[in-house]
Image (tube, rainbow, N blue to C red):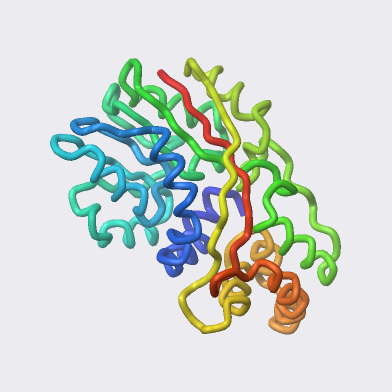
Amino acid sequence: MAEAEFWAGPMGREWALHAEALDRQLAPVAEIGLAELAARPGERVLDLGCGSGATTAALCAAVEPGGAVTGIDISADQIGAARSRPGAAHAEFIVADAETHAFPPDAYDALFSRFGCMFFGDPPKAYANIYRTLKPGARVVLTAWRALDRNPWAAVPVSVGADVLGPADPPVPGVPGPFAWATPEVFRPILEGTGFTAVNYREAPVMLQIGESEPADPVQRALAMLTRIGPLARRLKGLPKKTRAAVAARLAPALVDYVSDGWVRMPGLIWVISARK
């Protein structure tokens, strides 16, 4: 299944169902990225791959008074959740693929994306399309995961899953997916080839709090999330219940060491990428 189809369908629905837990999990990423962008009152901002609207709501608060925020996502389920989010009532939301959507030209002062930047089937086409809707001098801040092996939140479940399912094909930099922008050799030519200038990037460590609020046991909460959303979940999709249970049983002991203050907390590493039009 192509990434666009995957996110427009089953994965978008899954993320919408677990929006609160995922917003909590990715809050450190949003905080770092939004601080880097430093949106200002009166600005118009495009939130690329806005998901269920947590970053859109934060941007709305930052651009008031007089500003405006547009969130775009390919998932109708996630946009549905975003439209009902407190703090985002005045945002414009678009269900569309940003690779082909007919954006108005020279409309936005800034572009922000919390992980919505790595999934395009044709990145040069997508960023050329997005470039046109940004005003001259517009600021850009994108966050992307570093490589799988630098992100224990994903690498540990994938490694344990391989004990049951066999080795997984490693992510290939540049191929659409969560680790497509693992190296600057992938994303820098895309952005600079589009015409963006002052392309800079830095690493930032994050600690992810994983799981829903229930049940009481933190390992079981994290297991439920990691086997439904993320790299391991992709491998488990469509497999028999018995196989999924075997993987979960194998993964549970590996998560115990990550329990702190009643939650499974696992480290990750992101790129914080900035540029200008």
On screen, residue 164 versus residue 172, left or right, reads right
What is the quadrant of the C terminus in the image? top left
On screen, residue 78 versus residue 230, left or right, reads left
What is the quadrant of the N terminus in the image? bottom right
On screen, residue 96 versus residue 3, left or right, reads left
Q: Quadrant of residue 174?
A: top right
The percent position of residue 113, horizontal first and vertical second, equals 44, 40
- The front one of 109 and 211 is 211
Q: Quadrant of residue 239?
A: bottom right
The percent position of residue 124, horizontal first and vertical second, equals 54, 26
Say which residue appears at 25% left-offset and 62% top-offset.
84
**For the view shown, which residue lies furthest in the front direction?**
261
Say which residue appears at 43% left-offset and 69% top-offset.
17
On screen, residue 173 versus residue 159, left or right, reads left
Q: Is 104 above or below relative to 269?
A: above
- The front one of 120 and 229 is 229
Q: Is 263 above or below relative to 220?
A: above
The percent position of residue 43, horizontal first and vertical second, equals 23, 30
Total labels drawn: 0
- The front one of 45 and 100 is 45
Say which residue appears at 52% left-offset and 63% top-offset.
10
**For the view shown, which residue lies furthest in the left direction?**
66
The percent position of residue 55, horizontal first and vertical second, equals 36, 48
Say which residue appears at 51% left-offset and 28% top-offset.
125
